Image: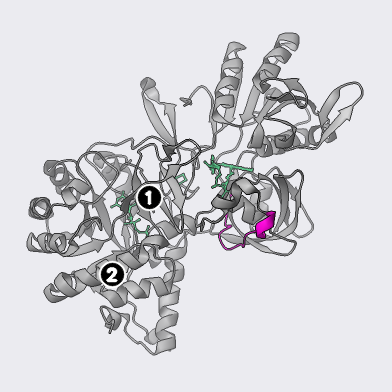
């Protein structure tokens, strides 16, 4: 009873990976450390940013200056990109894009600062025991839970073949370290470290394949076929990309799990703001809550926008 | 010393252990909140609106944040009367705080149908009549802005409420809220709650479209608090105080000081809405804060502060 209250974590590190993409690491002590270490990729947390101050005026990008002035009150949802054990508890990685008053405030956090969290929340990706191959697909800031899923599979399920497909508008929006390999061209360091083959697609062609990440997935399937055994496509990103991924998966007869995004006021099932329409029994649409029933759904069930 | 402080209040014959309640639509049907808060410490629990038939609600986005507030256009999404009675009422049975079920409808007959069934449930102490929802096409606020309609729906529900405490929830979106308050009290309301959200709109200048799929939504949160305090004060001074009718005040309450403003303005109970969405244990912190205030100021009975603004 009442054991999931907001609690305080401590910032370990906060740094920019690119102009607008940052990585925050926070330390969590027991008892919450245990619940986060048991968390499943795709689960998320609600972060309180309203008490933080804004960066200095000149450090706020021109296009966010008006939005920056908003007095925020609501928490912001983030899916950890990494959760690891430390001597004192757990360390959570948050990969975030600066896009408004909340994330601007987040960028001012420094080592030792307290940060109020609620979580882990929602349902993560389902990894069945007979899984043989996982095809991970991310678009833009859908990256964090997929990055964690890759690591989770590599450390806990060495029997599963993992392969990643990452898309973004352009290089600046790609929330990974990009490396150039003489043989393979651009590769993503986060996945290389895990020994996961990755393929990059950008809308503007600034790096990797010039086009949609779902085309990458489709081409790969044409060349390699899903292979023997159970294969699941796991995806997180903009809804249109998720819908396209679901279509490719369906064409190949593959299961597909998608992590959905909605504007969330509470993140814990109180307000009904975050509904996702799904196909209910008998084909009629029923609303599920993204925060509580999701954010991960079976793509067959989701009625995409 | 601390045990000498009495936070309890008499709310239309119901003894509440303290004045702090949940606001409808921000706390589910109780089970959703149980992991985050000790429900038994609340003064009263007020459920999400219930209608005769289940309602899917509006399309998304249903919420948008604004300066020190938020807009919602949930559209009274709820599981419907029968499922509520089957699945949720049993969970409310063991609860220490008084339970109010918020009732909504499109027509008077719908309010009556819900009230009639709920009157049979022993676990329910009272009904909150939502005649002020800004987010539905029919019913809702269209009832709440017309004193004649308020009187009709209040009287009709009162007749079937079987002795349950009947609380009418007022909209702030009228020229004279006291006329609405008076209509409800004259028609038999045992208590009034105020305020519901303010109809409002946010436009995305990039797409030049309203942010909410419903175009408009109801504004809640700290942004509305001073207006809500003012309206509670007016209704208390002009209607509720003289008639001995208790008020449940709400609108932007986040702290014990916020709650005390409403109590001093004339509220017997206070409800926490938007703040619960942000920190689900807010109500408990407010209860602790009220006790601390009483200790600090040598107040032995919190009830002595109701309407005590000078
Ligand atoms: C389950 C979940 C997990 C998430 N994980 C991450 C993550 O790991 N890293 C990350 O950078 N972002 C993540 N997000 C999105 C993140 O919550 C928003 O970017 C953040 O709230 C923006 O806050 P802000 O105040 O900076 O900008 P705001 O001004 O609040 O928003 C800026 C823009 O982002 C859009 N937006 C804001 N919140 C959401 C939302 N919840 N869903 C969809 N669009 C939104 C708004 O429409 C607006 O256009 C996640 C969202 C969800 C629902
Ligand atoms: C997400 C949300 C949903 C709400 N749903 C209801 C509802 O179903 N019925 C109702 O009478 N009021 C509803 N309200 C109004 C609140 O009960 C309350 O009157 C209002 O939000 C002001 O209080 P606050 O500023 O503390 O939130 C809702 C408010 C919010 C924010
Ligand atoms: S965000 Fe409140 S119910 Fe999902």
Above or below residue B194? Residue A77 is above
Q: CA distance from mark 1 to mark 2?
A: 28 Å
Counting the numbered discs, the total is 2
Which subunit holds the residue at mark 1?
B
Q: Which residues are magenta?
A: A45-59
Q: Which residue is mark 1?
A: B28
Q: Residue at x 83, y 32 (%)?
A: A192
Closer to the N terminus: mark 1 or mark 2?
A: 1
Rate crowding at label 2 as few (under 14), some (14 to 19) or many (20 or more) other CA atoms within 10 Å: some
Above or below residue A271? Residue B269 is below
Rate crowding at label 1 as few (under 14), some (14 to 19) or many (20 or more) other CA atoms within 10 Å: many
Q: Nearer the viewer, residue A181 or B273?
A: A181
In the displayed structure image, the side of residue A188 where residue B161 appears, left or right: left
Above or below residue A265? Residue B97 is below
Q: Residue at x 65, y 53 (%)?
A: A60
Q: Position of residue B284 (x, y in %)?
A: 44, 67
In the displayed structure image, the side of residue A249 where residue A217 appears, left or right: right
Q: Nearer the viewer, residue A197 or B38?
A: A197
Q: How is the image coloured?
A: one colour
Q: Position of residue B129 (x, y in %)?
A: 20, 53
Residue A15 seen in the current view = yes
Magenta segment, principal secondary structure? loop
Q: Position of residue A165 (x, y in %)?
A: 72, 25
Above or below residue B260? Residue B127 is above
Q: Which residue is mark 2?
A: B230
* Magenta span contains residue A43: no
Which subunit holds the residue at mark 2?
B
Q: Nearer the viewer, residue B8 or B130?
A: B130
């Amino acid at each position: 009873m009442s054991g999931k209250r907001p609690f305080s974590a401590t910032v370990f590190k906060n740094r920019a990976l690119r102009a607008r993409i940052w990585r925050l690491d926070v330390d969590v002590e027991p008892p919450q450390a245990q619940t986060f270490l048991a968390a499943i990729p795709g689960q998320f947390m609600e972060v309180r940013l309203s008490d933080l101050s804004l960066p200095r005026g000149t450090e706020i990008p021109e296009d966010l200056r008006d939005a920056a002035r908003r007095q925020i009150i609501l928490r912001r949802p983030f899916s950890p990109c990494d959760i690891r054990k430390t001597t004192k508890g757990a360390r959570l990685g948050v990969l975030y894009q600066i896009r408004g008053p909340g994330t601007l405030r987040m960028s001012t956090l420094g080592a030792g600062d307290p940060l109020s969290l609620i979580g882990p929340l929602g349902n993560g990706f389902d990894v069945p025991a007979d899984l043989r191959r996982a095809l991970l697909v991310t678009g833009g800031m859908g990256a964090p839970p997929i990055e964690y899923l890759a690591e989770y599979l590599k450390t806990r399920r060495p029997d599963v073949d993992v392969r990643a497909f990452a898309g973004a508008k352009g290089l600046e929006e790609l929330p990974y370290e990009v490396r150039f390999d003489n043989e393979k061209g651009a590769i993503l360091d986060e996945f290389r470290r895990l020994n996961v083959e990755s393929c990059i697609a950008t809308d503007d062609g600034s790096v990797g394949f010039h086009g949609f990440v779902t085309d990458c997935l489709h081409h790969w399937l044409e060349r390699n076929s899903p292979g023997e055994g159970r294969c699941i496509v796991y995806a997180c990103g903009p809804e249109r990309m998720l819908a396209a991924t679901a279509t490719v998966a369906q064409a190949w007869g593959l299961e597909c799990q998608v992590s959905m995004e909605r504007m969330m006021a509470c993140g814990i099932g109180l307000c009904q703001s975050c509904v996702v329409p799904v196909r209910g029994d008998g084909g009629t649409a029923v609303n599920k809550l993204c925060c509580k029933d999701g954010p991960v759904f079976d793509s067959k069930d989701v009625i995409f926008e | 010393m601390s045990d000498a402080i009495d936070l309890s209040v008499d709310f239309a014959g119901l003894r509440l252990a303290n004045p702090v309640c949940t606001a409808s639509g921000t706390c589910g049907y109780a089970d959703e909140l149980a992991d985050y808060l000790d429900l038994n410490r609340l003064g009263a629990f007020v459920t999400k609106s219930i209608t005769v038939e289940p309602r899917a609600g509006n399309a998304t986005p249903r919420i948008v944040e604004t300066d020190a507030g938020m807009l919602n256009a949930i559209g009274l999404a709820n599981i419907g009367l029968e499922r509520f009675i089957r699945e949720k009422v049993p969970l409310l049975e063991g609860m220490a705080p008084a339970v109010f079920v918020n009732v909504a409808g499109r027509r008077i007959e719908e309010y009556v149908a819900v009230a009639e069934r709920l009157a049979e449930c022993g676990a329910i102490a009272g009904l909150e009549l939502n005649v002020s929802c800004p987010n539905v096409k029919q019913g809702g606020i269209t009832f709440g802005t017309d004193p004649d309609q308020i009187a009709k729906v209040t009287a009709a529900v009162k007749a079937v409420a079987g002795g349950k405490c009947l609380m009418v929830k007022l909209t702030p979106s009228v020229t004279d809220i006291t006329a609405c308050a008076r209509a409800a009290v004259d028609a038999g309301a045992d208590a009034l709650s105020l305020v519901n959200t303010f109809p409002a709109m946010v436009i995305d200048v990039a797409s030049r479209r309203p942010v909410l799929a419903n175009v408009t939504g109801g504004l809640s949160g700290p942004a509305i608090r001073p207006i809500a305090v003012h309206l509670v004060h007016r209704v208390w001074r002009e209607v509720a105080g003289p008639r001995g009718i208790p008020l449940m005040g709400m609108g932007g309450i986040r702290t014990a000081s916020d709650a005390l403003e409403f109590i001093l303005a004339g509220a017997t109970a206070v409800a926490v809405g938007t703040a619960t969405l942000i920190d689900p244990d807010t109500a408990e912190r407010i209860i602790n804060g009220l006790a601390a205030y009483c200790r600090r100021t040598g107040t032995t009975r919190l009830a002595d502060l109701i309407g005590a603004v000078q």
